[in-house]
Every structure is written in structure tokens, then in C-alpha cells.
Image (cartoon, helix red, strand yellow):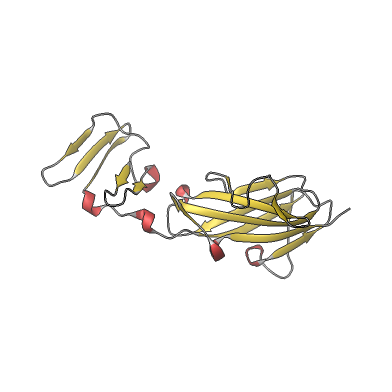
């Protein structure tokens, strides 16, 4: 279901994670009562609401992202001094190059609405994106909060993960999870 703001053309989308009966509705299964309530039917029942009482959840801020877990070569990474979410940098040996990160979006929205994107940049005589994309490109992970980076080459990297709990509102600045990685040469 979509709410269109006629003033500026912006749209707010709602789905089953916002309380709708399902992700789809039956054609012509809509009714507007004399009090202005709208009833819409679908495969799993119906929803009703008054347009003036719909909360514009898109106005919320983007969630802060934190790294919650790291596996190196299928073993838990354990830091003696600082929890992973507070680490700024990690140095690894050349044979510690299969990495798996788990992260979380910290926000008050519905977790099933969270979407993630990551970017990873390799530094070698200057900066360039590891996957030959412009530095501003992000790789979508949908709502998957697990990132596998197998067989990383040695070098210095910056990993960034951002999240969105609503369309077109993404984490930025300090709300992005950012980790500097150094994988030493053999």
C-alpha cells in the first residue's frame, strides 16, 4: 500500500511488517465509509484505517549500524581490549583472509523493514573500490545482515555498512558502521 503526498510527490510504502494483512490486496476490494474510513480486503483478511490517522513512519531517522560479530577462518574473532562494535581497525595475518561479518541496525522501526548495503574499498597507491564500482556505489544486501568476504587479498581496506528502515532514508556519517582492515602480506 502506498501513501502519496500530492504536495511534493513523495510516497510512503506500507507492507505486512507495518501491520497490513499481507503484501497484496484483492482487486476492487476497497470501500470508503461515510466517516472517511477506508476498508481494503486481501487474501488474509482486511485492513481499515482513516487516512488522517496513518503514521508517516518514513519520517523516522535512519538507523545506526553496528558490527556485532566477526568470524575469521570460521572462528570467532575475539578482541581482548574492545568490543567489535567499538573497534576502528583490525589487523589480520595473510592467512586470516576468509571473513564473515554480522551487523545490526539500531532503530525503533520494524526489524523486518531494515535493508542493508555495504561498500569496501582497497587502498593501494590511492583509493579505489574493490569491485570496480565508483566510490559512491553501494552493494545491496536486501534485509540480510550477514556479509561474507572470502579469500581477501592482502592490503588495507575500509568496510562500510549502512542501513535503511524506510525507502530512501539511509544511514550516513557516524551512523554508518566503518571498520579499517589490514591483511598483511605473506
Quadrant holding the N terminus: top left
Q: Nearer the viewer, residue 53 or 79?
A: 53
Q: Quadrant of residue 70?
A: bottom right
Q: Nearer the viewer, residue 49 or 155?
A: 155
Looking at the image, which residue sits at the far right? 186
Instruction: Find residue 154 and report its horizontal and vertical position in percent.
Output: 81, 52
Looking at the image, which residue sits at the far top? 27
Q: In this view, does 40 lie above or below 137?
A: above
Instruction: Find residue 141 and report its horizontal and vertical position in percent.
Output: 57, 44
Q: In which quarter of the image is residue 160?
A: bottom right
Looking at the image, which residue sits at the far bottom? 81
**On the rendered structure, is 173 left or right of 89?**
left
Instruction: Find residue 163 and report its horizontal and vertical position in percent.
Output: 52, 54
Instruction: Find residue 129 and report its horizontal and vertical position in percent.
Output: 68, 50
Q: How many numbered markers are drawn?
A: 0
Residue under the point 30% across and 46% down: 3
Q: In which quarter of the image is residue 32?
A: top left
Residue under the point 52% across and 46% down: 143
Amino acid at each position: 500500500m502506498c501513501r502519496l503526498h500530492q504536495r511534493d510527490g513523495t510516497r510512503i510504502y506500507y507492507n505486512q511488517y507495518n501491520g497490513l494483512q499481507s503484501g497484496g490486496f484483492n482487486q476492487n476490494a476497497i470501500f470508503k465509509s461515510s466517516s472517511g474510513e477506508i476498508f481494503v480486503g486481501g487474501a488474509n483478511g482486511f485492513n481499515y484505517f482513516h487516512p488522517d490517522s496513518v503514521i508517516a513512519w518514513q519520517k523516522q531517522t535512519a538507523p545506526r549500524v553496528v558490527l556485532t560479530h566477526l568470524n575469521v577462518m570460521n572462528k570467532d574473532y575475539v578482541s581482548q581490549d574492545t568490543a567489535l562494535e567499538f573497534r576502528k581497525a583490525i589487523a589480520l595475518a595473510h592467512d586470516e583472509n576468509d571473513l564473515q561479518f554480522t551487523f545490526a541496525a539500531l532503530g525503533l522501526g520494524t526489524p523486518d523493514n531494515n535493508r542493508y548495503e555495504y561498500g569496501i574499498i582497497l587502498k593501494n597507491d590511492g583509493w579505489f573500490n574493490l569491485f570496480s564500482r565508483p566510490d559512491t556505489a553501494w552493494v545491496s544486501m536486501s534485509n540480510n545482515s550477514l556479509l561474507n568476504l572470502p579469500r581477501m587479498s592482502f592490503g588495507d581496506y575500509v568496510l562500510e555498512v549502512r542501513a535503511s528502515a524506510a525507502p530512501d532514508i539511509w544511514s550516513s556519517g557516524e551512523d554508518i558502521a566503518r571498520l579499517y582492515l589490514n591483511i598483511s602480506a605473506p
